[in-house]
Amino acid sequence: MEFSTLALTLDAGVATIALNRPDKANAMSEPMWYEIKQAMEWLDNTPEARVGVLVGRGKYFTSGIDLAMLMGVGSQIEDDCDGRRREKLRRLILRLQDTLTSIERCRKPVLAAGHGACIGGGSDLITACDMRYCSANAYFTVKEIDVGMTADVGTLQRLPYLVGDGMARELAYTGRRVEGPEAQQMRLVNRCFDTPETLHEGVMEIACSIAAKSPLSIRGCKEMITYARDHSVADGLNYIATWNAAMLMSKDLFEASAANMQKRDPVFKD
């Protein structure tokens, strides 16, 4: 696909989706918001793409929402009726939320690999990903509090599941910086690598290992873990029973068994 704010490559089942506005610190402009959703839909619908890796080009992962976009909201929602103006703002927020929810909605795992700054909207972005990794020079901040607003596109809903209620409140209330090593300590990221170079190598190794697994089983794992977050244990158990009643007897199951007996690597259909 062709994008104006992203760069997309596909190699050995791993799709690398790069935020590509390095001259603007990868600030999340309006086109970028909508292109992220398009990229997730492409990843979901492309059989050859088994895993997505989200990265940032240049010095930073992202400086967050583009201030020009934020300042232009008023003109987008202009209306002589106060109720209609506020309805337009609500619909705009819902569209931005849906961009990030499209990462969860995508059946393929999406890994975030962040170096440098990950500010504001960047935190919303990575919390929607399946796993997060960073380099030691990375830092994260829920910056919205410092511009006089409440984060409204996903961080406050997803962050407590990652770092716990108390730490999520601390980060949201203070807007303080969390450096890479602390981000790993608080479980905001799975792992902190020493350098951006080792970050890239490490995350690609993880992505390739996922891409080598049964695609159908990986999609089931993502579906079940995400579902379990928002439902009771009983609901989750009932859902996985229904899922496996439908999906278990696949060619992937037989290929994995055959490969194990023959002491070779399995080869799965996309």
Image (tube, rainbow, N blue to C red):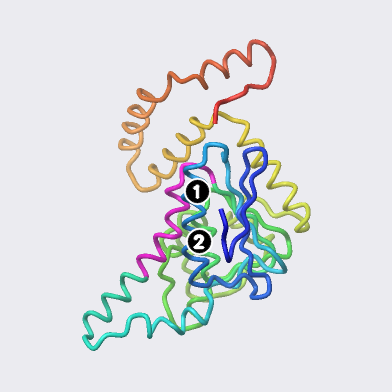
Among the two numbered marks 2 and 1 on one chain, the one whose residue lies closer to the N terminus: 2
Residue located 47% across and 36% down the image: 219
- Answer left or right for 146 relative to 14: left
> Which one is nearer the viewer's eye here, 155 or 212?
212
Q: Quick one: 232 or 150, which is closer to the camera?
A: 150
Mark 1 crowdedness (10 Å alpha carbons): few <14, some 14-19, many ≥20: some
- Viewer-nearest residue: 70 or 188: 70
What is the residue that sits farthest to the top in this orientation?
261
Q: Secondary structure at mark 2?
A: helix
Q: Residue at x 62, y 72 (%)?
A: 177
Q: Which residue is mark 1?
A: 42
* Residue 135's disc number: none
Q: Nearer the viewer, residue 122 or 189?
A: 122
Residue 5, above or below 43: below
- Answer whether residue 90 is magenta in the image: no
Determine the main secondary structure of the stretch shown in magenta: helix
Q: Give the amino acid at mark 1.
A: Trp
Residue 62's x, y, as percent? 61, 68
Residue 110 placement (x, y as % from top left): 55, 48
- Quarter of the figure with the C terminus: top right
In the visual, does 196 lie left or right of 187? right
Start-end of magenta stretch: 93-109
Q: Is residue 1 left or right of residue 246?
A: right
Residue, disc 2: 35
